[in-house]
Image: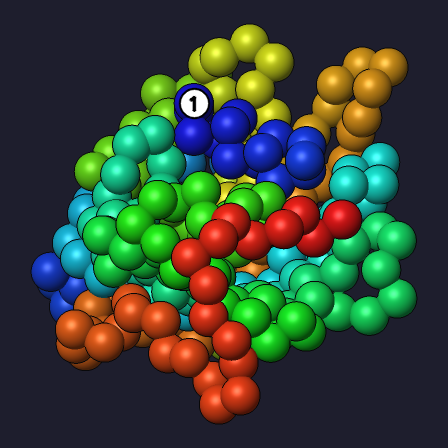
Amino acid sequence: MYRAITLALAICIISMPALADEKVSAPCQDQAKQAGKSESPLAVEILKKADSAAKTVSAVQYDVVVNITGDLQRFRGPSKASIIATGYNPPGIPEKYSVDTHMTLPCAKKEIHLTGGTDGKTYFLINHEKKTAHENKDPAVMGQASKFLLSGMMIEFVTPEPFTDEINGKSQKITGSKVIDGEDCYEIHVIYAVEKAPEAVWYISKKDFLPRGRIDKINIPNEVSGTIEKSLSNLKVDPKLDKETFKLKLPKDYKKTDKTAPDLT
């Protein structure tokens, strides 16, 4: 749940075949269709299957759309990104990743196009509007933009304990179902064990038990409230990677520097 809190707030404030064949029983499936009427044990059972499924993933590739609602729109706008990630570095980022994202800021008149990532040794950020690439062994070279790159990350695919926080939460309840990118998903509402942690709604595929979406519900009384909503598409588990996957690919006519990228705002 620590990652649930830190990742959600940071965004705003600045083997598979065997699992696929393992089905939830027919009575449970019928029960899951009755929004708000499912018992907690079934929700926990599904979260445990999601935990087991995610643990088999060594690398992942997907597209994600992030929508922001409520007061949180003061801090940032919607975004869409293509992400490749593998490995894990505490407290909540992949060891290696590549992100290409289009996003908006509250006062911006047009989208910002950023590409960034790391091979675990060198970090880079490309600001396509400025036609400038920043690369250095110090992760600080990415500047303020790093948190925007990571805002669409579904860290559960690469963390050693994908759904421990959810399984051990105060409350887990199936509240319905939803189709995301052609995948019929269980909708599971989770209240975490840590006080004041954002509540979350998870969308877990009924086929492979991997997550396809998440909604974080932020509510800080007298300060800010709203939601961060992620929807995944084109999910690929263990895509083919090579030594160039997570390295800077400098576009033609772009300049390169080892200096820290300036703030986007």
Residue at image x 61%, y 40%? 11
**Quarter holding residue 109:** bottom right
113 and 44: which is toward the camera: 113
Residue 41, x across and y down, in percent: 37, 29
109 and 185: which is toward the camera: 109
Left/right placement of residue 107 relative to residue 257 reads right
Mark 1 surroundings within 10 Å by alpha-carbon count, few (fewer than 14), some (14 through 19), many (20 or more):
few
**Quarter holding residue 45:** top left
Q: Is residue 249 above or below residue 79?
A: below
Q: Which residue is mark 1?
A: 2
Residue 220, x across and y down, in percent: 75, 18
Residue type for callout 1: Tyr
Q: Is residue 217 above or below residue 222?
A: below
103 and 120: which is toward the camera: 120
Q: Is residue 31 above or below residue 161?
A: below
Residue 241, x across and y down, in percent: 19, 74
Residue at image x 55%, y 9%? 195
Left/right placement of residue 99 relative to residue 78 reads left
Left/right placement of residue 60 relative to residue 37 reads left
Dot 1: element: helix
Residue 246, x across and y down, in percent: 29, 67
Residue at image x 48%, y 53%? 259
